[in-house]
Amino acid sequence: MTNGVREKKRILMLGAGFMQGVAIRSARAHGWHVVAVDGNPDAICRGIADRFEPVDLKDRDGLIALALSLKASGGLDGVFTAATDFSASVAAVAEACGLPGHSLEAALNASDKLRMRECFRRSSVPSPAFVGVDETGRGGILSVLAERGIGFPVVVKPVDNMGARGCRKVDSSRDLDSAISDAIRYSRTGQAIVEEYMEGPEFSVEALVYDGEIHMTGFADRHIFFPPYFIEMGHTIPTGLPEDAIASLLSVFKDGVRALGLSHGAAKGDIKLTSKGPMIGEIAGRLSGGYMSGWTFPYSSGIDLTGAALELAVGLRPSSLVPPLSLVSAERAWISIPGTVASVSGYDAARSVPFVRDVFPRAVPGDPVFFPVNNVEKCGNCLAVAPDRAQAIRAAEAACRSVCIRLESPNDRTDAFLAEGPTGLPAFPPDAFTLPSNVYPLKPVFCPMPAPTTVGKTVGGAILIPEPIIPFFDTVYDWQGRSIREAIDGAVAAEPGLLGVLSENEKKDPIPYWNALLRGGIQGIVYTYDRDHR
């Protein structure tokens, strides 16, 4: 203490997982004392905080009790979270302790999608028409939708979750009840929301709100794939939109922030540019999840956004939000077909790609993996930063293509996935390579091609390619952007024994291997080889 003033600020950090590590480190770099809490007693970043307490982030009473005890014994200057859906818990603690932050009412508006949509409706902020539903109302939902003039397609999602968990596009009444069931399962309150589907590109927007102003920070393009689900395979920051489109989207975002009552702290939004103009998907009273606020925005702008948001949380004002850099950062994900991870290779190759800054694995040997139906089921991410957009995107995508997940064999889930195709028909999960349906079933009519290189060496002989595939060999791409030719090269590099299986001198029918490649990419054909050669 100096003249009755504590020299070091103390902050309560909600969450001690990987995504909260940036905030914990930033607070420590400010010279502050960090008390971190997490429902997981083994949270990965618990050790970098000054103190850790195993408290469930849903337990508002427990969090408030801890915060009040901290305030009474040494003081507490702020409470904070990043990349969690517990901004309402932050606001509840701040309100109970008289700390800076969004009001609890505003945080609830930004956490519960039904409240959010209602706020937007009352303030005439463009967003989809909607209906709330729980178990008791499922039977009459079609009538309610008809009364509200909401037609298909619709989007069904839990009212209180993030990461696209339980979120699905529904094209007809046939699939509506199962989608509602999934959404309710992912909702802590047992409620789902059914809303109009917004067609159009999607963007992530971030801001800091203080002194009655909304200070815009990040604006990124989101890259969404794999309907009927909404899987973000990456983002690119800054956006490639023209200035007039950016201005229209930001205007609607700011109207949405005001409608929710967010007044002091971070705000992030997901916004679509539809044929009707900008429409808000959602706005949260926190920094973004994923890698935007803690990684790609600082990489591209030079601004420590997490540090600025932390300063707001303890009652300070950010010194500057003027970007000293003007770079482009791209984040991309790699995914897997269903199964169990046996091994992962290619990390060093991914890290060696020029302009790649980070490679973050999420699936390790022994982990079950799934074709993703939400954004927590991806297997890892690569981040790149470069002087221009094309360089950053190429680097991040090339790094993801460098990573190869080999699956344990045999595995019932992998076998079931591969048995479904390829068909060339729209389905989920989709084929790795989408070829016209009239290509199938593949016929045993082959054309020889020189064998690909493997481990830097040219191998003699030829492999047999089904003739219907040849026109698509260099023009159709898998989920990670590999052509069929590149996938064969990658598969042979992962398993040189495939050369013998696909050889013109091999008596074994190669069609099942080609089917496995077209259905499951490199993983599919390598798994088939491993299963057949156990």
Image: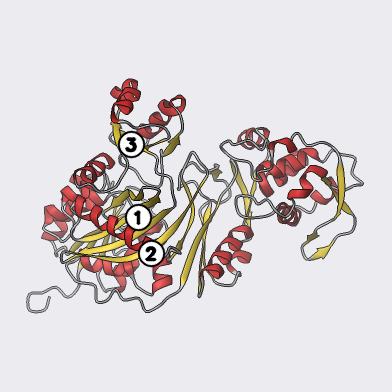
Q: Which residue is mark 1?
A: 83
Q: Which residue is mark 2?
A: 294
Q: CA distance from mark 2 to mark 3?
A: 27 Å
Q: Earlier in the sequence, mark 2 or mark 1?
A: 1
Mark 2 vs 1: CB contact within 8 A: yes
Mark 3 vs 1: CB contact within 8 A: no
The image quadrant where one finds the C terminus is top right
Q: CA distance from mark 3 to mark 1?
A: 18 Å
Report the amino acid beneath label 2. Gly
Can you tell which quarter of the image residue 427 is in?
A: top right
Label 1, secondary structure: give it. loop
Q: Nearer the viewer, residue 409 or 175?
A: 175
Report the amino acid beneath label 3. Ser
In this rendering, is residue 3 above or below 467?
Answer: below
Q: Dot 3: within a 10 Å radius of its alpha carbon, few (fewer than 14), some, or many (20 or more) residues?
A: some
Residue 480 visible in the shown view: yes
| Residue that appears at 21% across and 50% down | 107
The image quadrant where one finds the N terminus is bottom left
| Residue that appears at 21% across and 66% down | 312
Q: Dot 1: within a 10 Å radius of its alpha carbon, few (fewer than 14), some, or many (20 or more) residues?
A: many
Q: Dot 2: within a 10 Å radius of its alpha carbon, few (fewer than 14), some, or many (20 or more) residues?
A: many
Q: Residue furthest top?
A: 139
Locate residue 484, reporting x and y percent: 72, 51
Report the amino acid beneath label 1. Ala
Locate residue 424, reporting x and y percent: 66, 38
Locate residue 531, reporting x and y percent: 73, 39
Residue 46 visible in the shown view: no
Label 2, secondary structure: give it. helix
Q: Which residue is mark 3?
A: 187
| Residue that appears at 44% across and 37% down | 169
Mark 2 vs 3: CB contact within 8 A: no
